[in-house]
Amino acid sequence: MENKPPTDVSNSKKRKRSDGPKPQSQSPLAIKKQKLLVSRQNLPIWSRQKDIRESLRQHSILVLSGETGSGKSTQVPQFLLTEPWCTGKIAVTQPRRVAAISLARRVAEEMGSPLGASSPASKVGYSVRFDDNTSAGTRIKYLTEGMLLQEMLRDGALSQYSCVVVDEVHERSVDVDLLLGFLKQLLESGKRKKPLKIVVMSATADVESLSRFFSTPTPKSEETSNGTVHGDDEEFQGFSDDEQSTPAEKSQVSTCRVEGRQYPVKLHYIDKPTEDVVDAALQRIMHLHCKEPMPGDILVFMTGQEIIHGLQKLVEELAGNLPPEYPRLLVLPLFAALPQAAQQRIFERAPPNTRKVILSTNIAETSVTVPGVRYVVDTGKAKIKQYRNRLGLESLLVKPISKSSADQRKGRAGREAAGQCFRLYTQQSYEELEKDTKPEILRCDLSNAVLKMKARGVDDVFSFPFLTPPNREAMEKSLLQLLLLGTLNEDGKINDIGRKVARLPLTPTLGRIVLEAARPERDCLLEVIDIIACLSVENIFLPTDTEEAREKALEARSQLHRRQGDHLTLLAAVQAYAAETSDRKRWATTHLISHRAMQNVLNVRKQLTTQCKSLLPNPTVRSTVDEDTQENILKCFLKGYHGNNIARLCPDKTYKTFAGNQTVAIHPSSVLFGRKVEAVVYNEFVFTTKAYARGVSAIQLKWLEDVWGSS
Ligand SMILES: Nc1ncnc2c1ncn2[C@@H]1O[C@H](COP(=O)(O)OP(=O)(O)OP(=O)(O)O)[C@@H](O)[C@H]1O
């Protein structure tokens, strides 16, 4: 057996010092910790603890690969916590908030620590967009990649951290690619007073290219040739040169492979390709439920929210007709737009004699352990973001996943006991899948990434150390967009507006809309925040799939509907909900509005309002929104969309987009559906059976001069 876990060392010291009446080991947290220690010791990674610690004593960077479930995400930070160099915090990044939260919860339990802000003694916390659950004592912080990037804007040297663990690097989100580049630059800059250790890990990491990436020095561009990669001037204050380590030391990369997983997963394929994957999933779920013994929950990977809701209905219907001797079925959906509390329900154990079936998008694909899951059903598809450069459009398309994703999905079974994975595609189809998912940076709108680079002082974005350099044309396009948004100056340098936008937890477009609303001439900050809060959560309006339901909804929501369109309708809904003081849940039900989504809107609204305080210290608070304010609100959206997301009515009575001259119809979910107005602004361009604009409001063409004429 290896050394005792670091946490044990510190706690045994504490125990000796404590002379209170009740030994610490009897507290519920300590009992749980002891119990979990046994499972931790059985993880394959446990026996590699010494090697992992040793390699980071010798090197700055460790690229760690190991099978799903081998213990990387939960154990590595705990192994490193008591290393001599680890005097600060450890950041562990995750591609998604659901994983960041559940891992923090698990590791807190394993360490016998309260979670997050619940106690100053808490050692483990998490930080995700709109939810920072950490305390002054937090040593291990699970956070989304985006949150660490935000932190880097405030403190580019990451001075509170001794270590950054970049987990699930194979997902290759834009944020992780930026993070890797920034971390590499930070190590090369020699501007850290104390050592910073970096661990990059995944089950399916491309160890070779990651090692090469970190060990090849970044060529210096003109802008960075003075050796500094600087954001705000204050970022690197307090670092003295004499304590810098040499670049040779810093670029040392070590690698480690952890073999084996705790429990086996039996793999099944179908014999013939299926046309109807929803039906195949339904059959598989019901078959497992009726034939397989309890306990054994089922995790099903689907493509998106709508298809999940559809399958949920079907499963519930069939389960309702089963004879009483069968266990009950509890169906839980899981997708990104679902509020956190609802997402976390999947981690609760199912009630007695009940089997959980979780219908999830790819957000449960990596890092998470869903207690109780023994069976994974994989449809082999996911919605993947695709950016069409020429049109300047980003859309989500249903595509086959990669082998690496399929293996991650399989890895969600066999975590607490042996499991099985049912792939609803043939073995041949699996063999034909791409090895890895194409990095997001090659298929998305880059304006957010470029603005983040600019805000961190990377003026020459073309020489940024990318693991995979994006397409030059896409970069140029995003630079142009940022220039049009008014976030960059003509010379390409970030300006004050850009810096402010970059600090908001929103896309550059939404951030720019907020900034416009904070201008005293517009003074509609609170209203715009309300609308943007709605756009940041799941749809507040409950779905209406039949004609009858649509009519019912129209009637129920008639007082909220605004003839100007969806933006002001959202605002009316938030304001009416917030003004309801007696029974908000009932109000939501009567108006066919999701109470859960609304609670989330109010939460986001609160946080955005706090974050925007410095933009406009005394925004006008209104109980009713007069016509001038309505116009100002829509003008803010026009400012943010700067020519994109606008369509005008043509003589043939169709709407055509300003940019690209594409025909676009108003989506049936819009309050403007069927109406013909001079021009419209919309939030989203979606392509289903045809091109639709979603989230639409009527505008006047003469407003454009006022909007685009102003800076
Ligand atoms: N919330 C949890 N509930 C129960 N067991 C858990 C939980 N989280 C982790 N575990 C246990 O710890 C093991 C290791 O999990 P961990 O997330 O550290 O593995 P990993 O190697 O990072 O896997 P992956 O690559 O799939 O993210 C799991 O297989 C499971 O046995």
Image: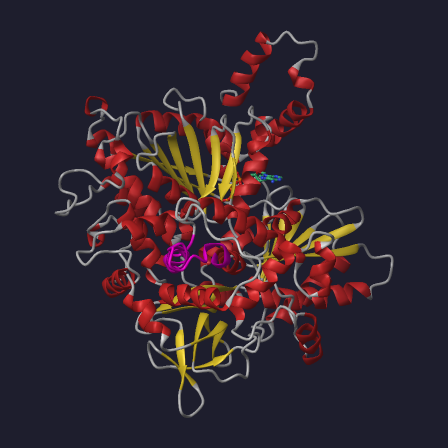
The single residue placed furthest to the right in the displayed view is 324
162 or 223, which lies in front? 223
Q: Is residue 199 visible?
A: yes
The residue positioned 86% from the left and 62% from the top of the image is: 323
Can residue 42 be seen in the rendering of this structure? no
Name the spot of residue 494 as percent of width and height, x first. Answer: 25, 51
- Where's residue 121, x and y in %? 56, 23
In magenta segment, residue 52:
no
* Percent position of residue 668, x then y: 56, 78
Q: What span is in magenta?
A: 506-528
Image quadrant assignment for residue 393: bottom left
- Which one is in front, 219 or 576? 576
- Residue 524 is a magenta residue: yes
Q: Residue at x 25, y 51 (%)?
A: 495
- Up-down relation of residue 324 to residue 317 (above or below): above
Whole-percent x, y for residue 186 in the image = 27, 37
What secondary structure do most residues of the magenta stretch adopt? Answer: helix
- Residue 637 against residue 613 in the figure, above or below: below
Would you place residue 669 above or below residue 168 in this image?
below
